[in-house]
Amino acid sequence: MTPRQRLILAALAACRTARMGGHLQRCTACGVETPLYNSCGDRHCPKCQGGARAAWLAERAGELLPVEYFHVVFSVPHELTPVAAAHPARFYTLLFRAVRETLLQIAAAPRHLGAHIGGLMVLHTWGQTLELHPHVHVIVPGGGLSPDGTRWISCKPGFFLPVRVLSRLLRGKLLAFLRQAYDRGELPFRQGPGSTGRSPAVHTLPLGVV
């Protein structure tokens, strides 16, 4: 772990304990005292950010359209995790860019959807067993605006975009972005990230009608 990550974990472990300090709450009727410990206030803390998270979710719920939504997950093969571990900021920026451009390009193609789409992207860097496993979750409505912006174009019920087409395009874009970054000296390795022929994986799950 990086020093920053260690500080965050230490703050989360100490949150609302005596290690953070606190104050005594005294009942004016019976005199009973109750210790109230301070919060860490870290943005990663599930205790401190519960209210902010609920407010954020409420705002996003208010933006939902009355259409079917899809959950699309873009993941990369484990051969690229050393690049993500060594250069997380640059790697994740390029991953977000590759995912965004892949979705926009395939959705805009007349043979697929022929529409300009929008969505919400969230980065996850760890798997269920806490190994480094970069992947991006995208929540997208089942359709988008026509090229002239005058009408809504819906996708087929229960089907958003072809998974294999998304996967192939993402693979090409991400590897191209990484190669360009490496050639510019932004990813200093003794050897380039390279490719083993495995494509980034894409999974789609219908989320139902809102």
Image (tube, rainbow, N blue to C red):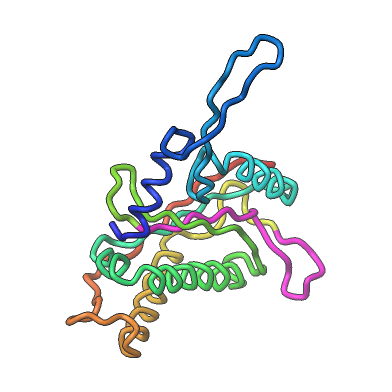
Residue 63 is one of the magenta-drawn residues = no
In the drawing, does residue 16 fall left or right of residue 109? left
| Magenta residues, dominant SS class | strand
Query: What residue range appears in magenta?
Result: 134-153
Residue 17, quarter of the rendered image: top left
Q: Position of residue 209 (x, y in %)?
A: 67, 41
In the drawing, does residue 54 fall left or right of residue 186? right
Q: Position of residue 107 (x, y in %)?
A: 59, 67
Which residue is located at x 53 percent, y 59 percent?
A: 161
Give the camera-side residue of 33 and 49. 33
Residue 144 is one of the magenta-drawn residues = yes
Q: Position of residue 129 (x, y in %)?
A: 28, 43
In the drawing, does residue 2 fall left or right of residue 103? left
Which residue is located at x 71 percent, y 61 percent?
A: 153
Which residue is located at x 57 percent, y 43 percent?
A: 49
| Residue that protrudes farthest toward the top in the picture | 30
Which residue is located at x 65 percent, y 48 percent?
A: 56
